[in-house]
Image (spheres, helix red, strand yellow):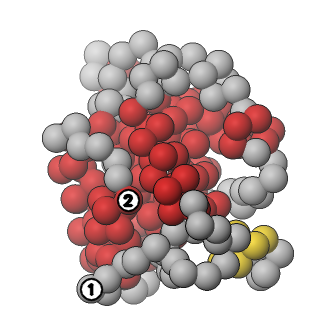
Amino acid sequence: MRDSVGWRHVVPHSKAPGPAIRDGFVDFAHGSAGHDPRRLSRLLSAYDDVRLEAAAGADLTSDLLARWNRLVRGVPVAAFRRAAAFAKNGRERYGLHADTEQRFASCLADTADRETPVTARAARAYLDVAFFHPHDDGNARSAGLVLQFVLLRERVELDEVAPILTTVRRADDAEGAADLARLVHGIATATRRRWLRANR
């Protein structure tokens, strides 16, 4: 599915960095994990690290993602999974082959490809984490953090993320993947428009 999407052309390049009047990810975190203070604290700690690494222009690597996964789960080690993974009540199976970990690392490196619009890269990276399912747990939270990292590294902010992070995606749905890129781009554009309107 990944290679069948025209990522370089599905959305236009962002014309300028897009600030936000509020942080949509923080709002989402409070809404989704607010009933569990420890879970919320871990997620926000990982997000703080995401923002720091994005501001520093860090490369997205498997080691960096593993660090965020450790933070959100509160575990000392987050190794790449060693068996097939299942999701959606067993309806989707994510296999494991000799080159799975290497292919995943290559996908993460693709987030630096400036010929592809940043909103498309962020959507693609989100799906990469979701469908490679690299760790035993916490992959949905990791995917959301990766989406934010790719955008923030190029100073694109979102004031809303719930429509992105709560919609169920299928690994075999190329059109759905393209729609996700359009959704991310649309929210980024609307975020910047709302910021400009508030700062006239």
Q: Quick check: 61 above or below 195?
A: below
Residue 166 x %, y %: 62, 60
Q: Quadrant of residue 198?
A: top left
Q: Could you tell me how many numbered marks the image carries? A: 2
Judge whether residue 22 can be spotted in this image: no
Task: Please state which of residues 97 and 159 is positioned toward the viewer in this rendering.
Answer: 97
Amino acid at the residue labelled 2: Ser
Please, what secondary structure does the residue beneath circle 1 have? loop
Tell me the residue at 39%/38% (across/down): 151
Residue 126 x %, y %: 54, 51
Q: In this rendering, which labeled residue sits more in front, label 2 or label 1?
A: 2
Label located before the other in sequence (2 or 1): 2
Q: In the visual, does 57 lie left or right of 163? A: left
Q: In the visual, does 1 lie left or right of 34? A: right
Judge whether residue 196 can be spotted in this image: yes
Q: Quadrant of residue 22?
A: top left
Tell me the quarter of the image containing the C terminus. Answer: top left
**Mark linked to residue 76:** 1
Amino acid at the residue labelled 1: Pro
**Mark linked to residue 105:** none
Tell me the residue at 29%/75% (across/down): 71
Q: Classify mark 2: residues with Cα within 10 Å, few (<14), some (14-19) or many (20+).
A: many
**Mark linked to residue 62:** 2
Tell me the residue at 36%/16% (across/down): 16
Residue 99 x %, y %: 57, 60
Q: Classify mark 1: residues with Cα within 10 Å, few (<14), some (14-19) or many (20+).
A: few
Task: Please state which of residues 134 and 145 is positioned toward the viewer in this rendering.
Answer: 134
Tell me the residue at 60%/22% (across/down): 8
Please, what secondary structure does the residue beneath circle 2 have? helix
In space, the residues marked 2 and 1 are separated at their CA atoms by: 16 Å
Q: Residue furthest top?
A: 15
